[in-house]
Amino acid sequence: MKSNLRKIFASRVFIGGAAAIAIWGVLALLIAAGIFSRSMQSLLIQICYYVTLALSLDLVVGYLGDLSLGHAAFYAVGAYSGCAFAVYTNLPLALKFIGGLLVGGICAAIVGFLISCAILKLRGDYLAIVTLAFGEFVRSIVKIIPGLGGTKGLLGIPSFDSRVVGFTASYIVLVLVIVAIYNFTHSRHGRTVTAIRDNAIAAESVGINIKRTKVLVFTISAFIAGLAGVVSGFYKTSITPGDFDYNVSIEALVMVVLGGMGSIRGTVIASAIIVLLPELLRGMDEYRMLIYAIVLIAMMMIKASPKCRALKEKLDGKINGFRSRFTRKRAK
């Protein structure tokens, strides 16, 4: 039994890894060949860090069931701390990027740990208001910290010379984040988190430590948001406090809700659509944002439709059935 489970797990890892490499190969080839325009190349990198940010928020909103409107705070902490490390250190570019990711992620995780300890008893609207205020607090604080550029922002952030290298670096971060979140949500800790979301009283009655679990989820979520901030800083080469206002938190929340809370695949697809949609409508300058808003409303209404949900469940069942049959054949 255990050997069969190992074979099935190995098959899934093989399929997922092969799919990730294939997607990267196709997109990198299109970029290198010049088939994608410069704006499309930029959008690919934006999709990578926006998906990373949305996935980090999905841990809190989708899996834990808490409403956070201040996720831009962790995004900002990661971006400023990681990019400041890159600006003020004399290291090769690759080490600056890796070091920036570690510094940005750790600093954001520390802030996430501290704020989660302070707001453990808050629920619903109260939690949303406090996290929203915390996001604005962080955005105001970075303006007065020496060395971060004040209202002008942090300038001179190094970037990758090649778009292929920049996309590859951001794509690797995204894939690692997806693997980490998938493993976490399918582990014993992940089942504990969803148990708290479904019924906190029942979870506590069977011995689950709700406070410790919530702090853990907030800390991991903040760490991943910090990684997204560092990737965005290396892409933009400069960051300002205005890049981390509450609209960023709302946009990330829309991505999570539109993709289906607690769904990695749905969040990835929804994030890509929301990033691409304004660019695809750029030719309609006067009506671009109006069409964007109408499309978002329509997508949300369709997604909330019972018929749409039934169709989605039917398709998911067929996909999962096909995947199970394929993995069983490989296991044999």
Image (cartoon, rainbow, N blue to C red):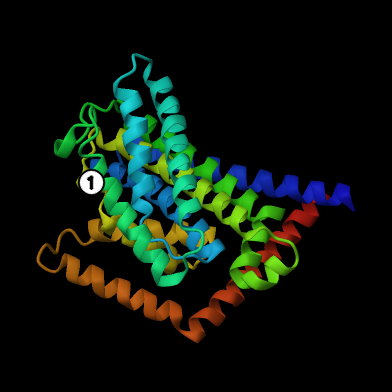
Residue 191 in the image: above or below residue 110:
below
Residue 100 in the image: above or below residue 36:
above
The answer to whether residue 262 of the structure is visible from this angle is: no
Residue 151, by quadrant, is top left
**Residue assigned mark 1:** 140
Between residue 316 and residue 104, name the one nearer to us: 104
How many marks are shown on the rendered structure? 1
Residue 84 in the image: above or below residue 78:
above
Residue 39, by quadrant, is top left
- Of all residues, the one furthest to the right in this rendering is 1
Which residue: 31% across, 35% down? 80
What is the x, y in percent for residue 316? 60, 70
Residue 90 in the image: above or below residue 201:
above
What is the x, y in percent for residue 276? 31, 56
Numbered disc 1: secondary structure: helix
Which residue: 28% across, 61% down? 277
Which residue: 43% across, 43% down? 111
- Of all residues, the one furthest to the top in this rendering is 90
What is the x, y in percent for residue 309? 52, 79
Between residue 214 and residue 323, name the one nearer to us: 214
What is the x, y in percent for residue 49? 38, 45
The answer to whether residue 133 of the structure is visible from this angle is: yes
Q: Tell me the crowding category of disc 1: few under 14, some 14 to 19, or many 20 or more residues within 10 angstroms, Cα based.
A: some
Which residue: 38% across, 65% down? 128
Q: Is residue 261 left or right of residue 17?
A: left
Amino acid type assigned to the residue bearing label 1 in the image: Ser
Q: Is residue 34 left or right of residue 126?
A: left
- Of all residues, the one furthest to the left in this rendering is 286
